[in-house]
Amino acid sequence: MPREYQFPFELRHLVYFREVARQLHFRRAAETLAIAQPALSRAIMQLEAILKTSLLTRSRRGVEVTAAGRLLIERTEPLLRGLAAIPSDLQALASGQVGRVRVAFTGLAMATVLPRILHDFHRRHPGIRLELTESPTSAQTAALQSGELACGFFHPDTPTPALRTHELLRERNGVLLPAKHPLAPRMPLRLRDLAATPFVLFPRTHNPGFYDRILAAFSSAGVTPRIAEEIWPRANGIGLVRAGLGATFMTPSEAKNLPPEVTFRPINGPAPESRLVLGWRALPPPDPALAAFLAIAGAATKPARLPR
Amino acid sequence: MPREYQFPFELRHLVYFREVARQLHFRRAAETLAIAQPALSRAIMQLEAILKTSLLTRSRRGVEVTAAGRLLIERTEPLLRGLAAIPSDLQALASGQVGRVRVAFTGLAMATVLPRILHDFHRRHPGIRLELTESPTSAQTAALQSGELACGFFHPDTPTPALRTHELLRERNGVLLPAKHPLAPRMPLRLRDLAATPFVLFPRTHNPGFYDRILAAFSSAGVTPRIAEEIWPRANGIGLVRAGLGATFMTPSEAKNLPPEVTFRPINGPAPESRLVLGWRALPPPDPALAAFLAIAGAATKPARLPR
DNA sequence: TATCCGTGATGCCCCGTGAGTATCAGTTCC
DNA sequence: GGAACTGATACTCACGGGGCATCACGGATA
């Protein structure tokens, strides 16, 4: 009465049969398998009973494999190979030689730290594949907590319980203007100069905290900004600025390699601050592939090593 | 001390783990598997020990699958499916719904009974694939005895022990001549009329008995034939006749659909006789696929059923 | 023809191990 | 602060795989 859930047969049967089919000789096959010949005979008979088919024709002058036996071998062989490969594959995974890491990032990460990290990581861990997705902060924190995501580059809003984070960047934002904008030549810029300029921002749901801090910065400068568009991903926002539809915020690090139609200007006085962090779940502890990625991502930005 | 030959794990482990990974709940998974929960816990722990990897992270609020666990599932799933499919596939084979039959034939068989048999067989047994090879008699009998071949259409020479045969055709040979041959218009032909005509025959090694009977037929007619070419396969011999290089023997059944450049003439008086049989190994008994083929091949030629 | 060798199959016993029951240990929720 | 979950642990039982000894049978050999 144990074993209500019946397997059709055991791996034993298949391995034993394969050996007999290879050697066409019970005694020698039993020797190879390091079992006694009667045990082998019984196992094969058992397998034949389970499959209700005769797999071998035993005659005095040796053993022959029937058509059913050949079919069984054909089917079995690749499966046994596959099963045999599993332990070493798992070892490779455990040792971090191979693996997969799902990583999300924001436009700022891609414009600053990420390319370097990806380059270093692929050089050091060619066996680990990264699955990269651009994704806003709010979606990232949710996906991290549910385990859909291994780690993410995002802009922390409220504190994120159950996540560990490592800061990569903390910079005051400047303003990205169309090159033809009247304020473009003006070098030290203050927020209140921008009262009349339409702004392009990310949708508020993507990072309510940061969004509100931006509005608060305007308020404290005594102005109410005009939000012309909420757009995502980031690159599209820069595209709109380039097309002359408005201005947007940007950190100095991000303001490299800009197209000629736009100009970056730092802000004098209070300005919203951007933080870029790398975040991952505190529990369970990172698997080797993720640990490797966290190590590289940490090293690529600061000499100090990442915790854990 | 039993089980010197260690399998990395048992199918049990994989099936159990798959179920836990599906349900993410030990108790429910155990229920589905119709075992008690402790047994399941131990099996999973065992598997983790065998693989030296943690596959699940157990927490109060449920179970999660680790990266290693996901890899294991990915690898395991298709293999388990494959194993599960084996029994029914073997049943299908045993019942003759599917299968493979290696069949050899000679040119005469293809020119007479075989096309009809193939047509009938594929209609009746669409799941059984035939592997057809043109092969001379001597090679067929050797291959049949060694088991390389399931059955063959050939021309029995000496008696073939260990083979069973079923006669399909027995006909006196006539002569195939180039249409321009001086003897072509001559309706009743005798062997001795052909003394000066070069003959195209199959290589003697392909069927020494029949070859010698042909020569004997000439001898008894008082002539020694001129063998111009020994050629194989059969179709090439007919090609040579067509090209005017000589004559060859042929049965009336075979002499259908001839090209216009050749003429068939029966022989008056002693003439070599061709027998076409279907042969297969007496032991082991035919598997269902072969049995199906033998049945069709027998029925296609004679109303009487095949023995066995 | 009698003997021996080698084949795979059987009979019998042992004990390893998978599984069951009862229970524990730790959370979460009311 | 229990009640009701979770998965893990402790003990016991018995199924069945495997070992050893032996059989049954055929072929080779003298």
Image (cartoon, coloured by chain):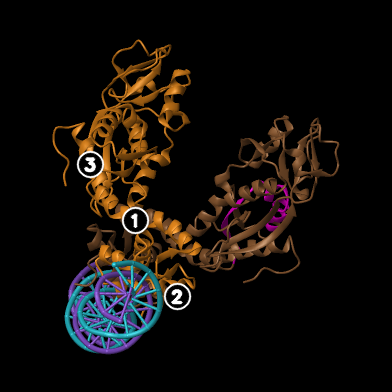
Chain colours: A brown, B orange, C cyan, D purple
Mark 1: few/some/many CA within 10 Å (<14, 14-19, 20+):
many
Position of B99 compared to B51: left or right? left
Kindly report the distance in space between the C-alpha atoms of the residues bearing marks 2 and 1.
31 Å
Q: Residue B91 or A117: which is nearer the viewer? A: A117
Residue type beneath disc 2: Ala
Label 3 secondary element: helix
Q: Given the image, what chain letter belongs to the residue carrying mark 2?
A: B
Q: CA distance from mark 2 to mark 3?
A: 51 Å
Residue A90 painted magenta = no
Of residue B295 and residue D25, the one placed in the foreground of this image is B295
Q: What residue sits 32% from the left and 44% below the top?
A: B100
Q: Is residue A248 above or below residue B236?
A: below
Residue A167 quadrant: bottom right
Contact check, label 2 and label 3, Cβ < 8 Å: no
Q: Residue at x 62, y 72 (%)?
A: A308
The image position of residue A100, as x and y in percent, is 56, 57
User: Would you name the residue on which mark 2 appears?
Assistant: B49
Residue linked to disc 3? B292
